Amino acid sequence: MLLFGRGHLAEAEGHARNAVRIAPTDPVSHNLMGMILTEMNRPQVGEFHYRRALELLGHRQPILLANLAWNLKNQGKMAESRALYEESVGLDPSILQTLLGWARMEETDRDFARADALLDQAEAMAPGHPSIWLHRAVVRGRTKHYDEALAILDRIALSSSGTGLGTNEMLEKGRLLDKMGRFDEAFEAFSGGKRLNVEQGGPVYMAAHATQLVERLKAYFTSSRLRIVPRATTLENNPKPIFILGFPRSGTTMVEQTLSAHPKVSAGDELTFVSDVADLMPRMLNSPLTYPEALADLWMGDQCEGLNNLRDYYLQRVKQLGIVEPGATRFTDKMPLNETHLGLIALMFPDAPLIHVLRHPLDIVLSVYSNHLTHGFYCANQLETIAQHYVLVMDLVAHYRREMTLKYLAVRYEDIVEDQEPNVRQILAFADLPFDKGCLKFHENKRYARTASYAQVTEQLYDKSRYRYRHYLKHLAPVIPILEPTIARLGYSIDG
């Protein structure tokens, strides 16, 4: 719980798994797993543990019901989530966090009046509570009442609690100020939020670990070696993955919403299965080596079909979680930074479309800096480390493209925004899908996008996020030398 509270989710997961191993019939251990896996964007597995905890407990415990409701909200199962929140509040109407979670669910589901009513109920219970004000600010921001939202955040800063704004509040304030065109103040708020997160023990960029992994991947995935490495076969009668690749905040959610509006495509969202396969590979191939070197065991007679087994593990996880809806023949996997494992993906699914969403690197760095993210070895707390990790990953992608034959399509976020239909047609054709007009109305897609972009993708296509960096050039000056070679290689420029 201490690690969970500090945001060290991967470490917390290890201890939670041990708790389940030691006490498999203890509801507390399963509740712990549910909490951690839900926050790690693995809500389907988290749901299993919450339901197991309820079963072991033997009665409907309000906090556990609210935890499961939050989990289901993160899966986009809004009706089920709402029913559980109603049940939880009916059993105990005095739990503030339950009301706040319910209000957030209604805000996510675009029922802003219901969210406000729940916050009124919370306010009656705990007048002046900063968390209530923050939730109100989020609702006001969603309804584009930016001045009201900002005034609420200023109330938090001046409140008698004396704690001032926390990390999330400061980042929310920055995003509001950005929408209001107050860019210097917005950047100050972003920087303050990131600085506070580090001061309070937030994880820092694991630069050495990230660099070492990339260098090992480059050393293994070479054309000379790949000529003799086998590939998995394609299962014709199974639903097939479409991999949407890209750095966080590059536009991958918009592309997934576009594709999943097609009647033949189910949204998988952020699936961890590729990285899970990488972690499990040594055991599955009976190798003493770690990934990627364990792939050398594919040359053994008893492991020559090992990639088929890795492929089947991935597809079995997809089946277990019920990702593919009736009538669909494809599903998306848009785990951020899956492009790090582009080589492994191409070995397991040589015919799968690899759609790499590009965006101006300065826009990506700025957008990551303005949100609380953990992807990318915790690079998000400093501009310089975001830029360094972006360059590291893009160099690795360039390496894969030189050394391997890939079914790869690079698409620019800016091009989709500027001229939507021909770019959507290109993406669908590349994924071997017929054109469907519904894909042009991705904002009408009712599924919940479980990312920081969830609000943006409920709106019609707009260009306010294109080249947003121009308002922040003086603030981004420290990272321009880091990014300049990559900016030029991708065909972008730096305009004032």
Image (cartoon, rainbow, N blue to C red):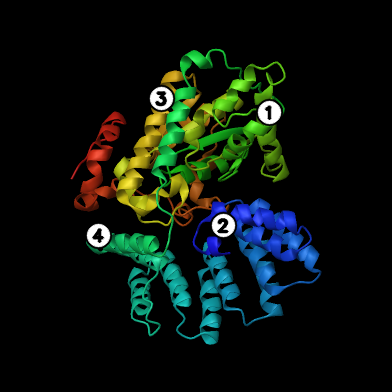
Q: Which mark is residue 286?
A: 1
Mark sitting earlier along the chain (2/1): 2
Distance of label 2 from label 4 (alpha carbons): 31 Å
Q: Is residue 473 visible?
A: yes
Residue 486 placement: quadrant: top left
**Is the Cβ of the residue at disc 3 closer than 8 Å to that at disc 2?**
no
**Is the Cβ of the residue at disc 2 closer than 8 Å to that at disc 1?**
no
* Labels 2, 1: front one: 1
Q: Residue at x 61, y 52 (%)?
A: 14
SS of the residue under disc 2: helix
Distance of label 3 from label 2 (alpha carbons): 33 Å
Q: Which residue is mark 3?
A: 399
Distance of label 1 from label 3 (alpha carbons): 28 Å
Mark sitting earlier along the chain (1/3): 1
478 or 29: which is nearer to us? 29
Distance of label 2 from label 1 (alpha carbons): 32 Å
Q: Which residue is mark 4?
A: 183
Count up the numbered dots: 4
Distance of label 1 from label 4 (alpha carbons): 54 Å
Q: Quadrant of the C terminus?
A: top left
Residue 404 location, x and y as percent? 48, 19
SS of the residue under disc 4: helix
Instruction: Categorize mark 2 by other alpha carbons within 10 Å: few (<14), some (14-19), many (20+).
Output: some
- Relative to 239, does residue 81 appear above or below in the rendering? below
Residue 352 location, x and y as percent? 57, 27
